[in-house]
Image (cartoon, coloured by chain):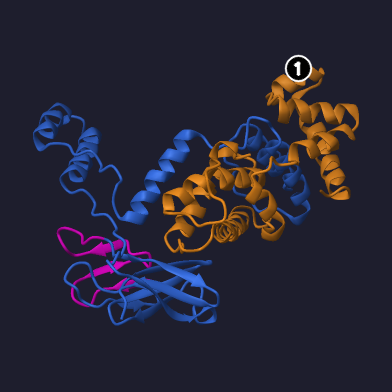
């Protein structure tokens, strides 16, 4: 019986909350759509908040330029020692402080985007050659990388380990990129999944990828 | 919708990604809100569209081409949202049908259409939907206004939505 779920869905819309996930039946579609249409007709809706517009702009600026986001605030070691001494008796608080220290001392390296001085869109393959969800290794004269079609969104990352430059291998079973030199692995979007290194390597460099007509292209240095 | 975000962009392309963003963030948000009906999801989906579309965007494309590309991306992002969260596609983006309104930034005709649909409903059904969706009253306040129990408001609202859905289906835009 999904009627209760549908009512909850409607209630979320009226309160401007994110509706909970549930398995709707095809017969629920019309009611859910009617509720959305009614909600969207409210005169106060339809414009994004200025905070949202500015926040997303900053995020995108970081994604595209590989920088520009405000770094996380650092906490000085001295400051932590003082706070830590006060909190030392409370174990729970001490654990939180310890994590805070770690974050303060070792800011997470951020993912950069490949931005050659002179780049070119280079064609890799026809659309059909890229299987959804699987990484495809590619190489151009100037780069090697892995390209993944994530439900229609193309993601390309460098195929060179960000630690010492070994060529990564695609681990198909785990859907990740493994480094043959040290125990380190990256997700198909370039995030560090794990590493044996005391300081984790930075994420893999992102490479811009796009569909152009029937072809898939990456933005790399020209031949 | 999106009135506050009009910028100078006739036929030519956009000079940089930021101008693409400024000119389109209001349009994409309004589109997404009209398809999901709540602010948090409309914001998330808008962000997803720009994250997916901006990096691979070819800035030498014309303005209309860039906007069509954003619409196609929005269609994919919305379809995935419905499939992953609710298993069925409650709303879709028909890119060809959407382009004229997206291009001209015309106010959506949706409010007028909703008013027509409401006008055709029986009094109590229309009243419950007005109190909930236009005045945004809680279930409890709606019950008080109508002199019925909260349980009855829920039942009445469900029936009213079903009737409204029928009206919308019988008189598509």
Q: Which residue is mark 1?
A: B144
Q: Specify the principal SS of the magenta part.
A: loop
x 31%, y 67%: residue: A186
Residue B48 visible? The answer is: yes
Residue B68, given in percent of the width and then of the height, sits at 59, 59
Q: Chain of mark 1?
A: B
**Rendered position, B14 above or below A16:** below
User: Which of the 4 image quarters holds residue B77?
Assistant: bottom right
- Check disc 1 and report its element: helix, strand or loop: helix
**Viewer-nearest residue: A116 or A156:** A116
- Residue A177, given in percent of the width and then of the height, sits at 32, 72
- The stretch drawn in magenta includes residue B156: no
Name the foreground residue: A212 vs A147.
A212
B145 over B40 or under it: above or below = above
Q: Residues within 10 Å of mark 1 (few under 14, many from 20)?
A: few
Residue positioned 30% across, 55% down in the render: A66
Q: Is residue A186 magenta?
A: yes
Which residue occupies 66% across, 33% down? A14
Count of marks placed on residues = 1
Nearest the viewer among A194 and B64 is B64
Q: Is residue B25 above or below residue A135?
A: above
Palette colour of chain B: orange
Q: Position of residue B66 (x, y in %)?
A: 54, 59
Q: Residue at x 76, y 17 (%)?
A: B144
What percent of the width, then of the height, locates residue B7?
52, 43
Q: Which residues are magenta?
A: A174-202
Q: Is residue B167 left or right of residue B99?
A: right
Question: Image quadrant for the C terminus of chain A?
Answer: bottom left
Chain A rendering hue: blue
In the displayed structure image, the side of residue B24 where residue B147 appears, left or right:
right
Q: Is residue A174 visible?
A: no
């Amino acid at each position: 019986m999904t009627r209760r779920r549908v009512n909850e869905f409607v209630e979320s819309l009226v309160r401007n909350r994110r509706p909970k996930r549930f398995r709707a039946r095809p017969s629920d579609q019309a009611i859910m759509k009617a509720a959305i249409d009614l909600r969207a007709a409210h005169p106060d809706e339809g414009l994004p908040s200025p905070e949202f517009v500015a926040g997303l702009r900053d995020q995108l600026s970081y994604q595209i330029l590989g920088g520009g986001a405000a770094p996380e605030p650092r906490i000085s070691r001295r400051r932590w020692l003082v706070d830590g001494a006060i909190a030392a008796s409370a174990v729970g608080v001490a654990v939180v402080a310890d994590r805070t220290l770690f974050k303060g001392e070792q800011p997470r390296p951020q993912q950069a985007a490949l931005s050659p001085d002179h780049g070119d869109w280079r064609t890799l393959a026809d659309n059909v050659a890229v299987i959804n969800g699987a990484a495809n290794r590619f190489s151009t004269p100037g780069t090697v990388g892995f390209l993944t079609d994530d439900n229609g969104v193309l993601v390309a990352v460098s195929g060179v380990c960000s630690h010492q430059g070994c060529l990564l291998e695609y681990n198909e079973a785990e859907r990740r990129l493994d480094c043959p030199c040290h125990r380190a692995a990256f997700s198909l979007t370039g995030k560090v999944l794990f590493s044996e290194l005391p300081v984790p390597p930075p994420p893999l460099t992102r490479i811009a990828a796009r569909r152009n007509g029937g072809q898939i292209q990456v933005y790399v240095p020209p031949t | 919708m999106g009135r506050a975000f009009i910028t100078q962009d006739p036929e030519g392309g956009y000079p940089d990604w930021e101008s693409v963003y400024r000119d389109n963030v209001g349009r994409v948000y309004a589109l997404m809100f009209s398809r999901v009906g709540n602010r948090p999801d409309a914001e998330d989906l808008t962000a997803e569209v720009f994250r997916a579309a901006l990096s691979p965007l070819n800035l030498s494309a014309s303005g209309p081409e860039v906007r069509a590309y954003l619409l196609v991306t929005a269609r994919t992002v919305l379809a995935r949202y419905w499939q992953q969260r609710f298993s069925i596609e409650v709303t879709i983006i028909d890119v060809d049908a959407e382009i004229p309104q997206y291009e001209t930034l015309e106010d959506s005709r949706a409010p007028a259409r909703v008013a027509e649909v409401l006008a055709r409903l029986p009094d109590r059904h229309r009243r419950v939907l007005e109190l909930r969706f236009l005045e945004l009253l809680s279930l409890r306040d709606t019950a008080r206004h109508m002199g019925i129990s909260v349980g009855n408001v829920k039942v009445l609202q469900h029936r009213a939505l079903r009737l409204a859905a029928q009206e919308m289906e019988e008189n598509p835009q």
